[in-house]
Image: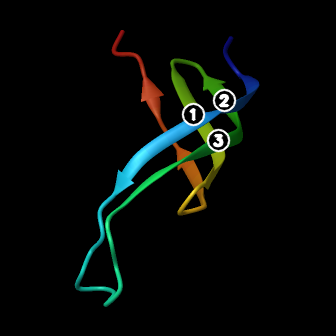
Amino acid sequence: MNGTARPFFEIGVHHGYLIAQQYKADNAINVYNWGIIAGIGMYLHLKKYELPIRIRYCYGNKVDMAILTIGYTFKLK
């Protein structure tokens, strides 16, 4: 699998509790957020290293957000 790229797609549900930071906004509140996840990404395999790149959109009942994740994995041996 060296030098290859594998695309992937994801869809699912998410939930989480967002904790407000009062010093940044006067009307900040704590909120429980749940919704649907849709994402695409690609795993790039380079010798013993792997570089996952993912873009995820979370559509929620209180907060919508887009997340870009870039990772780096390696094997010790």
The answer to which of marks 1 and 3 sits earlier in the sequence is 3
User: Label 1, label 2: how many angstroms apart (C-alpha)?
Assistant: 5 Å
Please name which of the two marks, 1 or 3, marks the residue nearer to the observer.
Answer: 3
The amino acid type, in three-letter code, at marker 1 is: Leu
| Quarter the N terminus occupies | top right
Sequence-first tag of 3 and 2: 3
The numbered dot on residue 44 is 2
Per the model, the C-alpha gap separating discs 1 and 3 is: 22 Å
How crowded is the residue under tag 1: few (<14 C-alpha within 10 Å), some, or many (20+)?
Answer: some
Q: Name the residue type under label 2.
A: Leu
Residue 68 in the image: above or below residue 26: above
Question: Mark 3: which amino acid?
Answer: Ile
User: Label 3, label 2: how many angstroms apart (C-alpha)?
Assistant: 22 Å
Instruction: Read off the residue under disc 3.
Output: 37
Vertical arrangement, residue 71 with respect to residue 68, above or below: above
Q: Say whether marks 1 and 2 touch (CB < 8 Å).
A: yes
Q: Residue at x 32, y 65 (%)?
A: 30
Please state the horizontal and vertical placement of residue 6, each as a whole percent of the image.
74, 23
* Element under disc 2: strand
Residue ID for mark 1: 51
Q: Quadrant of residue 52?
A: top right
Q: Residue at x 35, y 52 (%)?
A: 17
Q: Residue at x 58, y 56 (%)?
A: 61
